[in-house]
Amino acid sequence: FLSIYSHPKEAGKWDAVVCCFFMDACPNAIDVIRLVHHMLRPGGMFINFGPLLYHWSGPAMRPDDKSFEDYQSRFSFLDQR
């Protein structure tokens, strides 16, 4: 989705974007929402059908993280949520 619709020719060309069971399967829902905003004409609508179960859980722990504290120190700049 991102690679196809991020092309400059798609900017402001759409009256509406409708998705069904898509947003909760996206790797990064925020990037999709930004792109949809870029795609829509002024006054355009974004309609999402289906669950929105997406949540950001942060970067995965790696095997070299010996403890949760190691993980936290690597990503101390991130939001605590």
Image: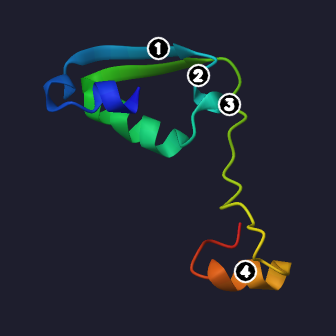
Inspect the image, locate mark 4, and give the three-letter code of the amino acid beneath it.
Gln
Q: What residue does disc 1 label?
A: 18
Are circles 1 and 4 on residues that touch, CB within 8 Å? Answer: no
Q: Position of residue 62 (x, y in %)?
A: 73, 67
Verify CB contact (< 8 Å) between mark 2 and mark 3.
Answer: no
The residue mark sitting in front, 1 or 2, is 2
The secondary element bearing badge 4 is classed as helix
Is residue 44 depicted above or below 36 in this figure?
above
Distance of label 1 from label 4 (alpha carbons): 38 Å
Q: Quadrant of residue 15?
A: top left
Task: Identify the residue under disc 3.
Answer: 52
The residue type indicated by label 2 comes to Phe
Residue 34: horizontal and vertical position, in percent? 38, 41
Structural crowding at the residue carrying mark 4, measured as other residues with C-alpha within 10 Å and reported as few (<14), some (14–19) or many (≥20): some
Within 10 Å of the Cα at label 1, are there few (<14), some (14-19), or many (20+) other Cα atoms?
few
Q: From mark 3 to mark 1, how far is it between C-alphas?
A: 14 Å
Q: Closer to the N terminus: mark 2 or mark 4?
A: 2
Instruction: Find disc 2 in the rendering and name its residue.
Output: 22
- Residue furthest out toward the left: 9
In the picture, the disc for residue 72 is 4
Position of 74 relative to 33 (above/below): below
Q: Residue at x 31, y 25 (%)?
A: 4
- Vertical position of residue 61 compared to residue 69: above or below: above
Report the mark closest to the observer, 2 or 4: 4
- Report the front residue among 41 and 3: 3
Nearer to us: label 1 or label 4: 4
Q: Left of 53 or right of it: where is 44?
A: left
Whole-number angstrom distance, CA of label 1 to CA of label 2: 10 Å
Element type at mark 3: loop
Asked if labels 1 and 3 touch by Cβ distance under 8 angstroms, the answer is no
- Mark 3: amino acid: Leu
Nearer-N-terminus badge (1/4): 1
